[in-house]
């Protein structure tokens, strides 16, 4: 990662077991110097979900950092013109999926483990987001909060087909059934998108332990009210989720864009920028 990110981002991460679960199977990682935030919500038997989510965040952070030492995240792919980070996220998530799948298959105490995942790479005034499952990324821009991810879940499929409303889905019994997860099958495809960022944007990565307990309007209110203090925002979101029942582990990563961070142009990146 280039030094164009120096002072460009602030990232705060917090995780809490909630009030009902005996252990915390979430894992969250953030590094502003790399422009990287990752959140995973594990599932499986005793301790297995915790292992899966920890493997996902640790391995993905390490492998992306190694990949970006060789090729900068913002460098354009010769074939697609997309940032290298987009292709790298797909490749490294596939690698992480394989590692977790093998661990699950080879160790009986970890059998059936898996995890959701949402990961962001910030580079060249863009955010590349990849997700698998129902952990989410929200963006607060001005007075508008929008979800930039689309849940891979049974409920979301029912909503998309018009069988149930989003409001009804909040109280459905099967709201935590995901249709895609890391480590459950030999192969998995992450959904990946690239979005331009603006100074002042706030991005929220969160597990379902937050958004199942807190309405989006209240999430937005907390982010707006304490937007100048990301640590306070993160802790307040967790507090509200616990105040509303804390039925699951609650994890958040809050990212604020402090200044523009365009990448220096050179070689293929300059050519693609000129052509486009």
Image (cartoon, rainbow, N blue to C red):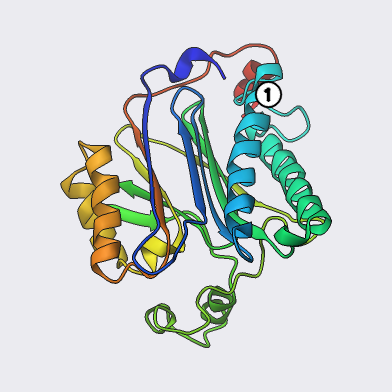
Task: Pick the quarter of the image with the C terminus.
Answer: top right
Q: Which residue is mark 1?
A: 66
Relative to 116, does residue 159 appear above or below in the rendering? below
> Dividing the picture into quarters, in which one does residue 95 lie?
top right
Q: Say few, some or many: other residues with alpha carbon within 10 Å of mark 1 (under 14 / 14 to 19 / 20 or more).
A: few
Q: Residue at x 46, y 22 (%)?
A: 33
Q: Residue at x 72, y 29 (%)?
A: 77
In the image, taking residue 197 as reference, residue 219 lies left or right, namely left
Count of marks, rendered view: 1
Relative to 197, does residue 209 appear above or below in the rendering? below
Outermost bottom residue: 163
In the image, taking residue 200 as reference, residue 48 lies left or right, namely right
In the image, taking residue 163 as reference, residue 93 lies left or right, namely right
Relative to 207, does residue 262 appear above or below in the rendering? above
Residue 52, x across and y down, in percent: 64, 52
Q: Is residue 142 visible?
A: no
Q: Secondary structure at mark 1?
A: helix
Residue 79, x across and y down, in percent: 78, 32
Q: Residue at x 80, y 55 (%)?
A: 187
> Dividing the picture into quarters, in which one does residue 58 lie?
top right
Outermost left residue: 225
Residue 178, x across and y down, in percent: 60, 70
Q: Residue at x 27, y 39 (%)?
A: 231
Q: Tell which of 76 and 12 is nearer to you.
A: 12
Residue 15, x across and y down, in percent: 40, 49
Task: Pick the quarter of the image with the N terminus.
Answer: top right
């Amino acid at each position: 990662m280039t030094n164009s990110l120096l002072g460009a981002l602030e990232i705060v991460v917090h995780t809490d077991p909630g009030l009902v679960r005996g252990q915390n199977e979430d894992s969250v990682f953030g590094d502003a110097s790399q422009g990287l935030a990752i959140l995973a919500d594990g599932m499986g038997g005793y301790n297995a979900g915790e292992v899966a989510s920890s493997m996902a965040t640790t391995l993905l952070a390490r492998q992306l950092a190694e990949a970006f030492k060789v090729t900068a995240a913002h460098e354009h792919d010769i074939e697609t013109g997309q940032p290298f980070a987009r292709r790298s996220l797909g490749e490294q998530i596939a690698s992480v999926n394989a590692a977790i799948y093998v661990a699950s298959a080879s160790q009986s105490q970890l059998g059936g483990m898996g995890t959701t995942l949402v990961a962001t790479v910030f580079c060249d005034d863009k955010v590349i987001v990849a997700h698998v499952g129902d952990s989410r990324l929200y963006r607060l821009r001005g007075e508008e909060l929008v979800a930039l991810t689309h849940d891979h879940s049974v409920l979301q499929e029912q909503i998309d087909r018009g069988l149930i409303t989003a409001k009804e889905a909040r109280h459905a019994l099967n709201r935590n059934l995901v249709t895609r997860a890391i480590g459950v099958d030999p192969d998995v495809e992450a959904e990946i998108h690239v979005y331009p960022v603006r100074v002042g944007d706030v991005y929220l990565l969160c597990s379902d332990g937050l958004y199942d307990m807190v309405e989006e309007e209240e999430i937005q209110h907390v982010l707006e009210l304490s937007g100048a203090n990301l640590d306070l925002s993160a802790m307040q979101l967790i507090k509200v989720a616990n105040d509303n029942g804390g039925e699951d582990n609650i994890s958040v990563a809050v990212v604020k864009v402090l200044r523009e961070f365009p990448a220096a142009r050179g070689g293929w990146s300059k050519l693609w920028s000129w052509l486009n």
